Image (tube, rainbow, N blue to C red):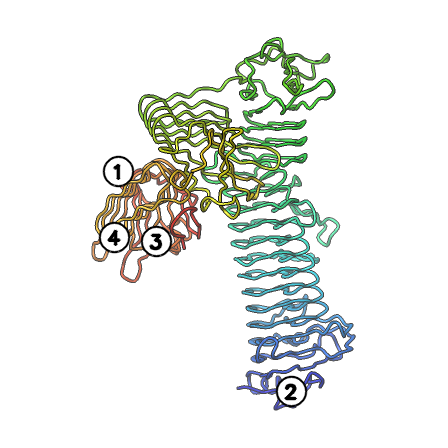
Amino acid sequence: MEYNVKDFGAKGDGKTDDTDAIQAAIDAAHKAGGGTVYLPSGEYRVSGGDEASDGALIIKSNVYIVGAGMGETVIKLVDGWDEKLTGIIRSANGEKTHDYGISDLTIDGNQDNTEGEVDGFYTGYIPGKNGADYNVTVERVEIREVSRYAFDPHEQTINLTIRDSVAHDNGKDGFVADFQIGAVFENNVSYNNGRHGFNIVTSSHDIVFTNNVAYGNGANGLVVQRGSEDRDFVYNVEIEGGSFHDNGQEGVLIKMSTDVTLQGAEIYGNGYAGVRVQGVEDVRILDNYIHDNAQSKANAEVIVESYDDRDGPSDDYYETQNVTVKGNTIVGSANSTYGIQERADGTDYTSIGNNSVSGTQRGIVQLSGTNSTFSGRSGDAYQFIDGSTGNDLLTGTPIADLIVGGSGNDTLSGDAGNDVLEGGAGSDRLTGGEGADIFRFTAVSDSYYTASSSVADQILDFDASNDRIDLTGLGFTGLGDGYGGTLAVLANSDGSRTYLRSYEKDADGRYFSLTLDGNFVGRLDDSNLVFRHKTIAGTEGDDSLTGNAMAEILDGGSGNDSLAGGLGNDVLRGGAGDDILNGGLGRDQLSGGEGADIFRFTSVADSYQNSGDNFSDLILDFDPGEDRIDLSGLGFSGLGDGHNGTLLLWTSSETNRTYLKNFDTDADGRRFEIALEGVFSDLSEKQLVFERLVLEGTRLGDQLSGTELNEELLGGAGRDILNGGAGDDILDGGSERDTLTGGSGADVFRFNATLDSFRNYDNGTSRVDDITDFTVGEDLIDLSALGYSGLGNGYDGTLAVLLNADGTKTYLKDRESDADGNHFEIALDGNYADQLSNGDFIFTNLEVIGSSSQAA
């Protein structure tokens, strides 16, 4: 039954105090066993009772207060109110109120014209006492201008739901969950509040927090915390989606809590860290986009640390344990020190992996825990960290890193792993850390002295039995007396330092000089000093040659060869035949030789400039009549002015070179650039491949074969045979039973519907696709359109991994069928039973650059 407050004398004219009239309608509904109290459009002024806990309006069990909409129905505190008021609308103190709610209205605290401490909406029994309100619903409610907390459901409330509501311009927190049990917060927005946007606190547990947004708040966007009393930790909180941005401190703070998951959110533009966890156990930070935080001061994008409460209510120190940070995309700002930083304060058992981190100033990851672990992204051989034109402090990860300082007096530290450190220009300090490290010098200007100054680099921890110094770019022939293209080795008087020196100056008066801490006289030789490129030679057949971290010469010889240079400043020579050349990282020189060759670039980091240095590759013998440059993996749209995803074609008759340049920087300040020996002013899309080529079948059984380019093969209907050939291809068999072969390269096998590959046990139909050459860690199976969550037992949205009796085929099976009895299933040739992981699949939405379609 509906009770219209106008029938009880309420005016809604913005002047009259309507408290008694509205309360009379609430009491009447309650007395009748429940009902809806309706407030038509208007501004209803209200005032409080004698005690703060009396509130202004006391809602009762089985009563729902409903307005005409946010901004249409406004309940506003009277001017001049100067007392404490714990809830403009609230449940009665100590009554265990149940099955009630408010919707479609605005609560206005009128704080510009009042002086008391005022909360907007308040629920709960009595703080510190046994008892609870339960079954509370809030929908489409706006609370503004209260001096304290807007939405303040308090201890204890069971089964609270707040959705589609807004809190803004309030004195403290927009939304509070204080000792809530089984609460749902969904699609709410909290902005411009004095303290936190959302605050889940005081032993709350079993909380579902979905698609909420917090921005412009004075402190944190979202806090999950025990609070200022010595209570049980908050636990079992699921945070899914939403965004937390442009808040004064952290985007998300998880503090003194257990079993919390933060997943699928965007967190950016906050003053301090994007995410900070303190004194927690079993927290998971998964698949979020965390970027451009640390706007107010230097911070890591994600900080994992313990919490010292020894001066607090518990008199305890809480070490953080078992935090997982995986699958996130993290992009730093100018103040972001690390992507993920684990403090050296007792924090341990942190697991970090499969994150994409870029744009940070000191390093990707810093770990301190004895039992903490780190792994790179699937397929990453090295983490690439490069500096700026300033004096950088760059720290590597526990796996292999390529760290490039650029100009400036830099400090580079490799941490664990087999690292490559290149200080670049300036006087740099280099520490390899654990592992077999390479210290690389590409020009005399990297480390030298003159008649008046010294700009020499210093290696602090050289290990003569494991580490190497790469001097291949300098032209020295070996050790000697420092003349005739040799380097002299000498130690200082007390043997604490060793110097590698040339006594022959270059045209600018610079003498190469390098300092090593320790005495290495008699211990330096060809095993740890590299003066010449190592040559990796092919045969007369079709070879696949791959370089490593050193500077190398890859010589394909005759045959149709595939050359991949790795991390060094490599020289790639295709020789005769139709070759594919990919220099990889480093300043590479590429010669295709005879035949129709492809020069492939798969990352901006393959060939680029930044503000401090040039890392561009040089193609020495491009033939515009036969050769092509494959840029399909980079996302450029074509030739243009070098901005907005285009490449500028620029020629120089003075240097006899042609350049392809992009002026848009990536997150790490890199601008893609390639140089070609010769003037090629007529280059066009005939020679430049910008988009992935699409080979499309018919409704019949087709046989599609790719080339050495990156292609998309679409079988369509019919029993198709798809072979990607060389290149990083996408294979989509479509319906019917298809045979899919990726060939060389990192290929994606895509399935868009259950009927693309299935088995029906009821009618005996089997149309299962067969992948013949899946490579773990390189290829991917794209199931993002099908809604699976991962590998498992084949139930509840997972896929089971099964092996046939003789171990020759592996099956991915959904044990649950669609309405027609069809079970999704894929076959892979070979035994992958103990090899496949979620990292070999795309289960969520991911755009493949250059693809003609996007996974749903």
If you read the primary sequence from the N terminus, does the residue marked by circle 1 or circle 2 appear first?
A: 2
Q: Amino acid at mark 3?
A: Asn
Q: Which structural element holds mark 1?
A: loop
Residue 428, percent from left and from top: 66, 27
Q: Label 1 belongs to which residue?
A: 806
Residue 497, percent from left and from top: 68, 17
Q: Is residue 656 above or below residue 807?
A: above
Residue 579 shows up from this direction = yes
Residue in the image at 62% along x and 31% along y: 413
Q: Which structural element holds mark 4?
A: loop
If you read the primary sequence from the N terminus, does the residue marked by circle 1 or circle 4 appear first?
A: 4
Q: Is residue 715 above or below residue 85?
A: above
If you read the primary sequence from the N terminus, does the residue marked by circle 3 or circle 2 appear first?
A: 2
Would you say 193 lies left or right of 237 here? right
Q: Label 2 belongs to which residue?
A: 24
Q: Label 3 belongs to which residue?
A: 752
Residue in the image at 46% along x and 19% along y: 534
Q: Label 4 belongs to which residue?
A: 717
Q: CA distance from mark 1 to mark 2?
A: 79 Å
Q: CA distance from mark 4 to mark 3?
A: 13 Å
Labels 2 & 4 near each other (Cβ < 8 A): no
Q: CA distance from mark 3 to mark 2?
A: 59 Å
